[in-house]
Amino acid sequence: MAEQPGAPHRTTGSTLLHPLSTLLGIPLDQINFVACQLFALLAAFWFRIYLSPSHASSAVRHAFATLFGIYFAVFCFGWYSIHLFVLVMMNYGIMNMASIPNIHRYSFVVAMGYLTLCHISRIYIFHYGILTTDFSGGLCCPLMIITQKITTLACQLHDGIGRQAEELTAEQNRLAVKSRPSLLEYLSYLLNFMSIIAGPCSNYKDYIAFIEGRHVHMKLLEVNWKQKGYDRLPDPSPTGAVMYKLFITLVSLILFLTLTKNFPMVYIIDNEFLDKTPFLSRLGYLYVVTQAAKPKYYFAWTLADAVNNAAGYGFSGVDERGTFRWDLLSNLNIWNIETATSFKMYIENWNIQTAAWLKRVCYDRAPWYPTALTFILSALWHDKKQLQTLLPLISAS
């Protein structure tokens, strides 16, 4: 994404790939992001084959996932990555010192408060422009994902220890965590290399089952695999799903680079465009550049999904046709988005894991006005760039 003219210099992480950034004319933070995700993809294949539960202990798998995740964070964000570690350690302290009846409240306030302060500092203190990436070259995205994970685990720990089974919904009972995680488990869940850069958020119970080698078996039992026509417990491979998702990422990347070159977003704040272009034309151009930006999210989210699948994480069961599904962590359904016939259908297939998080930590727990409170939380959690982008168009109309 192009930077706004006059925007302050953005601090990035490693400058190792700066020559490639100069050669391609792409900002270094984006080059670092793609490089880390591609390296994570290779590491995920290696992790699934050579550090499988049959070859390595859970502690080794946790340690490897954590150390590589920390390395990717430092590589991408440099010293700004300390925000991630501060937030994680503050909430680990809360998880161990707070009383179970209040653990989800304290974790929520601290995690959301820290994220909100980062949003405010980016916009009002460091004065980053409306068309730049986040205050540290993209760090807000990992902070947002970690905030989701912190609050998810805190709520599920509260369900598992602080509430009776009959008080829980079927989903809450299934995902309830019965004991506080160790430091290594906590760090691995929040900082693992599969999701540290671009997510998605996942449930703690699913992640631990994956690390311990119970993930696939657990999901097959949930769908009763014997009724699907299998004589013995199957051993599904994610390779096909990964290859398909990598094809989607490639197409999305080509579309994004092509469309944004022909329809630059920076044009919407051009003085001549604002002063001389009719309002309906400005609105139409805004619609076009918004559509042109979507493949960027298709690319990032599908690649993140593929990384998790390559590591063996993300299996969700067997569909009605007996096909293995690897969409437990999928964040979008592109076909349903592009063919949506209603706003409801659109939002149900966009940023799926965030919608699930909002439901689990807010909507299902709000004592009153759950819909209003959920929308408020969504607004606080999300970056404010999209709203700010609209302001010049509205003010000029």
Image: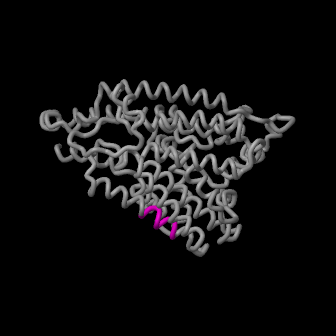
**Does residue 157 sit above or below 63 in this rendering?**
below
**Magenta span: helix, strand or loop, mainly?**
helix
Instruction: Tell me if residue 340 can be seen.
Output: no
Q: Nearer the viewer, residue 222 or 313?
A: 313
Q: Quadrant of the C terminus?
A: top left
What segment carries the magenta color?
106-113
Q: Is residue 124 left or right of residue 240?
A: left
Residue at the location (41% across, 33% down)? 17
Q: How is the image coloured?
A: one colour
Residue 74 on image: x %, y %: 46, 47
Q: Nearer the viewer, residue 39 or 195?
A: 39
Q: Is residue 58 left or right of residue 284?
A: right
Q: Residue furthest right?
A: 231
Residue 298: give x, y in percent of width and height: 47, 34
In the rendered image, residue 98 lying in the magenta stretch gets the answer: no
Residue 201: x and y, percent? 55, 49
| Vertical placement of residue 381 versus 103, above or below | above
- Residue located 61% across and 58% down the image: 186
Is residue 110 in the magenta section? yes
Residue 317 spot, x, y in % from top left: 71, 40
Q: Which quarter of the figure has residue 52? A: top right
Q: Is residue 71 visible?
A: yes
Quarter of the picture holding the N terminus: top left
